[in-house]
Image: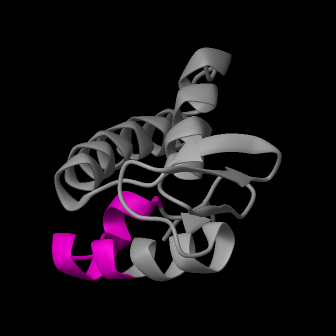
């Protein structure tokens, strides 16, 4: 077994469980905002997502996370734009960056 961190894609939650985790994190970080409203998180203005927008962004995050970790595992050079896109999605999904691994 590799010592490399496993990607979030290998630990993904069901869409319902992921949305529930997002909702709790958004409430804690943004306060009582409704879907479509904006709040400040970590000095950035972030839109509170509804369930459909969340599902789209979550799928995109899972795909990019899998690509990122397959590149890391193969020793390939990581494109900075890929990592920026991945971390940007993680911020929108209210996830915490744990050094290239993301979680709620």
Q: Inspect the magenta stretch and tell me whether residue 17 lies in it.
A: yes
Foreground pick, 56 / 72: 56
In the rendered image, is residue 74 in sight? Answer: yes
Residue at 46% of width from left, 58% of height from top?
Answer: 7
Residue 101 locus on image (x, y percent) = 61, 60
- State the image quarter where residue 29 is shown: bottom right
Location of the C terminus (image quadrant)? bottom right
- State the image quarter where residue 64 is shown: top left
Q: Inspect the magenta stretch and tell me whether residue 38 lies in it.
A: no
In the image, taking residue 63 as reference, residue 2 lies left or right, namely: right
Foreground pick, 39 / 22: 39
Residue at 19% of width from left, 69% of height from top?
Answer: 15
Residue at 25% of width from left, 47% of height from top?
Answer: 53
Residue 44 locus on image (x, y percent) = 73, 41
Magenta portion: prevailing SS class? helix
In the image, taking residue 26 as reference, residue 14 lies left or right, namely: left
Residue at 72% of width from left, 64% of height from top?
Answer: 98
| Residue extending farthest right | 43
Foreground pick, 15 / 45: 45
* Colour scheme: one colour
In the rendered image, is residue 104 in sight? Answer: no
Picture layout, residue 84 above or below residue 22: above
Picture layout, residue 66 above or below residue 18: above
Total marks shown come to 0
Residue 73 locus on image (x, y percent) = 52, 44
Picture layout, residue 40 above or below residue 83: below
The magenta stretch spans which residues? 7-20
């Amino acid at each position: 077994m590799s010592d490399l961190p496993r990607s979030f894609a290998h630990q993904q939650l069901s869409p319902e469980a992921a949305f529930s985790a997002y909702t709790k994190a958004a409430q804690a970080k943004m306060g009582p905002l409704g879907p479509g409203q904006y709040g400040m998180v970590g000095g950035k203005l972030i839109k509170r997502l509804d369930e459909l927008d969340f599902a789209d962004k979550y799928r995109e995050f899972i795909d990019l996370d899998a690509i990122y970790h397959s590149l890391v595992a193969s020793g390939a050079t990581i494109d900075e734009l890929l990592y920026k896109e991945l971390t940007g999605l993680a911020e929108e999904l209210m996830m915490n960056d744990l050094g290239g691994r993301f979680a709620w």
